[in-house]
Amino acid sequence: MQGTEDLYSVSSPRRVLSFSKRRKATVSFLDPDDKAASGFGVSGDHGPKSSEVYGFVGSITTVVATVIFFVWAYVPENWLQAIGIFYYPNKYWALAVPTYAMVTILLALLFYVGLNFMSTSPPTSLNTIFDEFSREPSTFIPLREGDEQPIEPISDIGINKINDLMFNNVK
């Protein structure tokens, strides 16, 4: 059975609080960087993270696949047959697959830009200035004078005021 002090203790990774009725409240801080306390220089988790392993395996796989691709694409067929490699795709695919991939990516980007142009309002439309969330500025008269005045309610600045500020006050 646990003692009464354990019932009133609160543990966290950084500190332990004890609220025992018999003793005064004590606080002890555990330093996670203290290597002497655990005997090892690392915390409870040992070994590399899974994302590090996947990244390492992915980078090695990419390098090996690139080397195999370039050997297949550039080494003459009689050399490949001399070292015992008889089954491999036609050399046509060494140019066709990267070309198809680049054309597909280019067409996808053009389709994306075209779709955005189709879903955007024309420049002459008032929908580029006003929408359902637009708020007209209200007339705000402060009740008090002095430094502490309330903040005005949020609203959109009208296009006429913007044009006046940008183009009519030029010196």
Image (cartoon, rainbow, N blue to C red):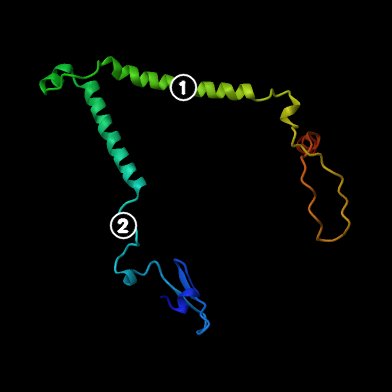
**Residue 104 percent location from the top left of the image:** 43, 20
Classify 10 Å Cα crowding around label 1: few (below 14), some (14-19), many (20 and above): few
Which residue in the protein does label 1 denote? Answer: 106
Q: Which SS class for mark 2?
A: loop
In front of the other: 50 or 165: 50
For the point 25% across and 16% down, the residue is 91
**Residues at marks 1 and 2, CA–CA distance in whole angstroms:** 45 Å
* Quarter containing the C terminus: top right
Query: As drawn, is 29 to the left or to the right of 51?
Result: right
- Of the residues shown, which amino acid type is indicated by label 2? His
In front of the other: 135 or 40: 40
Tag in front: 1 or 2: 2
Q: Which SS class for mark 1?
A: helix
Disc 1 or 2, which lies upstream in sequence? 2
In front of the other: 26 or 86: 26
Q: Quadrant of residue 127?
A: top right
Which residue in the protein does label 2 denote? Answer: 46
For the point 34% across and 72% down, the residue is 37
**Residue 96 percent location from the top left of the image:** 33, 17
42 is higher (above) or lower (below) than 113: below
